[in-house]
Image (spheres, rainbow, N blue to C red):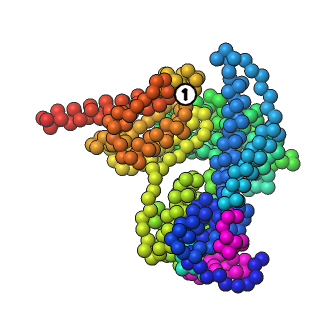
Amino acid sequence: MNDTRTRTVDVAVIGAGTAGLAAYRAARKAGKRALLIEAGAYGTTCARVGCMPSKLLIAAAEAAHHATHARPFGVSATVAIDGRAVMDRVRSERDRFVGFVIESVDNIPPEHRLTGRARFTGPDALDVDGTRVEAPSIVIATGSSPFIPPVFDAIRDRLIVNDDVFAWEDLPRSVAVFGAGVIGLELGQALHRLGVRVRVFGRSGTVGPLGDPVVKEAAAAALRAELDVDFDAKVRAVEPEGKTGVAVRFADADGNERVEHFEAALIAAGRRPNLFDLGVERAGIGPDATIDRETLRWGDTHVFVAGDANDDAPLLHEAADEGTIAGDNAARFPDVRTGKRRTPLAIAFTEPALAVVAGGFRAVSERGPFVVGQVDFGDQGRSRIMLQNKGVARLYADPRSRRFLGAEIAGPRAEHLAHLLAWAHQAELTIDQMLAMPFYHPVVEEGLRTALRDVAAKLDAETTSAGAKTGA
């Protein structure tokens, strides 16, 4: 515990993850005295327990899957999966990524850092394990934690969250995965491909980040063909079994009651912002106060919230942008300004990969009329060559301006396709301008051209129809 004393700064940043580091740097760039406060180990969620270790596990799973499914190409292979070797590489590379973050923190002058748990004691004051910190502006960047619904109370002592997976020394023989969002699907499919018996219990029809019913159904069909997954599972009970196992009682698709036994249970029911136990009410933040997405200001206070802590877009690149906006506004407070936000982009690294651009179907449905163009990857040339011809992509356009509004994808190379579409959206391109771009042959990107042509034809038909009605 630190000795009781007082630190006076211009901006206090609570949390040294991606958003917190960005906020600290923005405040320092503005010439302000900034203090970075961290209660736990340094190293971002992404590097330590998120995107990087999960992609390491997925890479191992893809290597095993492609080798085992090479026979249709005329190639035979025998695959042996060494769970310990898989997890050794995951942890080793994970530690390397975390090391880069720690190194960047170590380069911050010690007098700009403070270790301890921060709590508000007043509008402009924090207690950090006995040290009083006074700051006219405060940035909260405390990240998020896995959410565990009460239904799992009976097995809480043996339940695994995604943070725990990357500490495994070996792969388990069987895992029940609860949740079919991005984390549940990515880890569930990866573990299945690495020889683990997996069943995924979804809820309310959720399929990763998808909202478009056509894309969701295509993705669900492709995933069900490989993986034991129920996207609207009827779980009756989850009970402890033996020293570490669990028994899951559920109704299958035909309504029959079943019980399955698993060595481990992984909960992937989403994450919740780490805003509890901060005493934010002492900062004048009421229960109805909201966080402005454009400024990151919490209500009408001098407190700003960035990264996973604001529960808006829990992604590394968004956290970095938000940290910069929050830190800049905290430094210039009360002259708060709107920050520049990029086109929203969400990706699940499954197979088929899933992607949502600019909010996808839900966003365009809320804004008014739109036109849809579609490509089915079943007959798309390059996709068929690679035997990855599953899924569909749907692109949305404004019927009046012909501007590209967003997309949802379930298909091969979706992470790359989504980036191209996000760039097009941020550049405010029209469908015609996108069609004027080069498309090489044969590449998966030609599928986008197919969908764009479909949109263009429908837009032309609407224009012709409207012209006929008005006598134009």
Which residue in the structure is indicated by mark 1? 390
Quarter holding the C terminus is: top left
Q: Quadrant of residue 5?
A: bottom right
Quarter holding the N terminus is: bottom right
The picture places residue 114, in percent across and down from the top left corner, at 69, 73
Q: Tag count in the figure?
A: 1
Q: Is residue 124 magenta?
A: yes
The picture places residue 8, in percent across and down from the top left corner, at 61, 82
> Which residue is nearer to you in this view: 310 or 343?
343
Q: Which residues are magenta?
A: 105-133
Q: Which residue extends farthest bottom?
A: 5
Q: Quadrant of residue 208?
A: top right
The picture places residue 263, in percent across and down from the top left corner, at 81, 42
Please give the name of the residue rendered at 52% of the width and 58% of the height, measured from the top-left corner. 321
Task: Kindly tell me whether residue 430 is visible in this rendering.
Answer: yes
Seen in the picture, residue 79 relative to 357 is either above or below; the reply is above
Please give the name of the residue rendered at 67% of the width and 64% of the height, measured from the top-left corner. 107
Q: Quadrant of residue 421?
A: top left
> Which residue is nearer to you in this view: 29 or 10?
29
